[in-house]
Amino acid sequence: MSETIFDKILRKEIPAEIVYEDESAISFKDISPQAPVHVLVIPKVKVAGFADFESRSNEEVGALFKAAAITARKLGLADDGYRIVVNQGRNGQQTVDYIHIHILGGRPMNWPPG
Ligand code: 5GP
């Protein structure tokens, strides 16, 4: 797997505003927010994309989603709701090859997505 900007954020080699961290994941603010709250959640054990979850353990997959739910609650989004997004591959507009859950909140979301 090629090195990404998120590998550097995980190693704290480049700054990011970390909002949650546990033994399996970290959550940090997106550098280019698309909503009043826009946070990314990544696993500490690297996975390139959502498609690669097929070969990972249920624990790994579950831990990332659990970290996202905890992050959203800690950000105060639980009552009003929020959107989680995982972009996969070229058609999904994935630009960083390190799996990340987007948490978007602080305003009503539109549907369908673009
Ligand atoms: P993707 O398009 O791969 O689903 O999302 C990648 C996200 O990473 C984008 O929302 C982009 O703004 C964010 N991003 C890219 N580079 C950096 C960075 O250096 N720091 C932070 N915090 N976010 C980044």
Image (cartoon, helix red, strand yellow):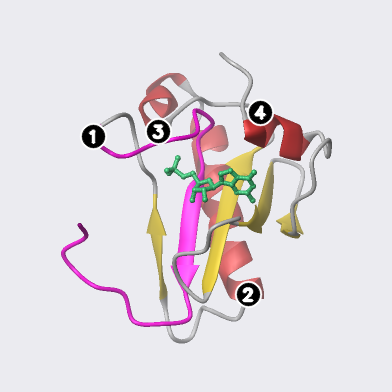
Give the mark nearest the N terminus, 4 or 1. Answer: 4
Q: Amino acid at mark 4?
A: Val
Query: Is tag 4's residue or tag 2's residue first in the polypeptide sequence?
Result: 4
Which mark is drawn over residue 45? 4
Q: Which residues are magenta?
A: 91-114
Task: Check if residue 111 falls in the magenta segment.
Answer: yes
Kindly identify which residue carries mark 1: 91
Judging depth in this view, the residue of 77 and 62 nearest the camera is 77
Residue topped by disc 3:
50
Q: Pointer 1: residues within 10 angstroms few (<14), some, or many (20+)?
A: few
**Mark 2: amino acid:** Leu
Secondary structure of the residue carrying tag 4 is loop
Which residue, as the protein is rendered here, is positioned at the far top?
A: 1
Say if 41 sits above or below 76 in the image: above
In-image side of 46 versus 36 (left or right): right
Crowd around label 2: few <14 · some 14–19 · many ≥20 (10 Å): some
Q: Which kind of residue does numbered mark 1 sit on? A: Asn
- Which residue matches tag 2? 75
Judged from the image, the secondary structure of the residue bearing numbered disc 3 is helix
| Image side of residue 50 versus residue 70, left or right | left
Q: Residue at point 56% right, 34% down?
A: 60
